[in-house]
Image: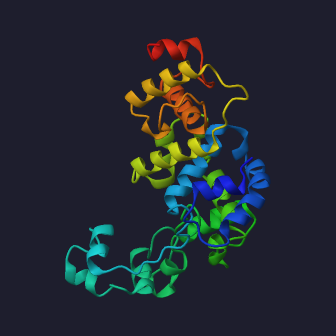
Amino acid sequence: MIALAQLQELYPRARTGYLPVFAATAHDLFEEFGIAQTANRLHFFLAQIGHESGGLSSVEEGLSYGAERIMQVWPSRFPTLASAQAFARSPEKLGNFVYANRLGNGAPATGDGFRYRGRGYIQITGKDSYKQVGARAGLDLVAKPESAAAPDEALRVACAFWRWKDLNALCDTGDFTKVTKRINGGTVGLPDRLAWLEKVRRVLAEPPATQPDAETVRAVQRALQMRGFTSIGAADGLLGPRTAAAIRQFRLNNGLGDGLLDATLLTILGL
């Protein structure tokens, strides 16, 4: 379904040791959790975890912030520099304060806030989330929260989160923004998430077995470039992965369904 080479192109900044495990387990996990059933499900999943984990480079919330950054992240909790200064570069103290008495966590003294800070490819946060995701993953994440960020379990945990939030059904509507809202509670980072989606579709796009006429492909490439699809590169007349991904995205944007070149597409492009 997805090869190690594709993962390396997709997530070049991934933490050492994570991608080989991802590639080895992805097929079975995506089948088990229903993510493999449609292109939207797979593409949306890979794009969302790309954003949430910084391309699989950050699988655990650090919380080692300076005072100014603390004020930016939690403006209502730290309205002044002085209020934030006491928590600067103190990740455990900060986590236990900002995540206390919510998300299923106890008071600061319990240590729940830091213990159940954001982890994994999709950054699950809070004791309740660890409990719900762990139940669906078959893991005791409440007792061993660090498992959510472990190379051997991170993908299973992300898939379990996907199931918990019933995101496959939402993917089937094609509404990427609604998927983002269900994950994030809003649309924080939406432009970056959309950029990840475009990258996923480009990396996973498969060119057709037979190439269409080169002049037609060049005309389509130029028309798409004029409409903002600059990622396809030069208009070389070859229907490769970048061009195929751009065509599929254009078709999706315009309600044309799946496919590549056909008379309807050429008519809309004015060709």
Q: Is residue 267 left or right of residue 18?
A: left
Q: Is residue 45 left or right of residue 61?
A: right
Q: Is residue 113 left or right of residue 149?
A: left
Based on the displayed image, in which of its 4 quarters is residue 132 positioned?
bottom right
Please state which of residues 124 and 113 is positioned toward the viewer in this rendering.
124
Please state which of residues 241 and 234 is positioned toward the viewer in this rendering.
234
Please state which of residues 201 and 95 is positioned toward the viewer in this rendering.
201
Figure colour scheme: rainbow
Relative vertical location of residue 134 with respect to residue 165 in this rendering, above or below: below
Q: Residue at left 77%, top 59%?
A: 25
Based on the displayed image, in which of its 4 quarters is residue 263 positioned?
top right
Relative vertical location of residue 119 with respect to residue 257 in this rendering, above or below: below
Relative vertical location of residue 242 with respect to residue 185 in this rendering, above or below: above
Q: Residue 180: image x %, image y %?
A: 48, 48
Based on the displayed image, in which of its 4 quarters is residue 66 positioned?
bottom left
Relative vertical location of residue 12 with respect to residue 177 in this rendering, above or below: below
Q: Residue at left 26%, top 85%?
A: 85
Q: Residue 219: image x %, image y %?
A: 48, 21
Question: For the image shown, how many numbered marks are present on the structure?
Answer: 0
Q: Residue at left 72%, top 52%?
A: 3
Please state which of residues 223 and 55 is positioned toward the viewer in this rendering.
223
Q: Residue 177: image x %, image y %?
A: 46, 42
Q: Residue at left 68%, top 66%?
A: 134
Q: Is residue 148 left or right of residue 268?
A: right
Using the rendered image of the protein, determine whether residue 241 is visible from the camera's viewpoint: yes
Using the rendered image of the protein, determine whether residue 186 is visible from the camera's viewpoint: no
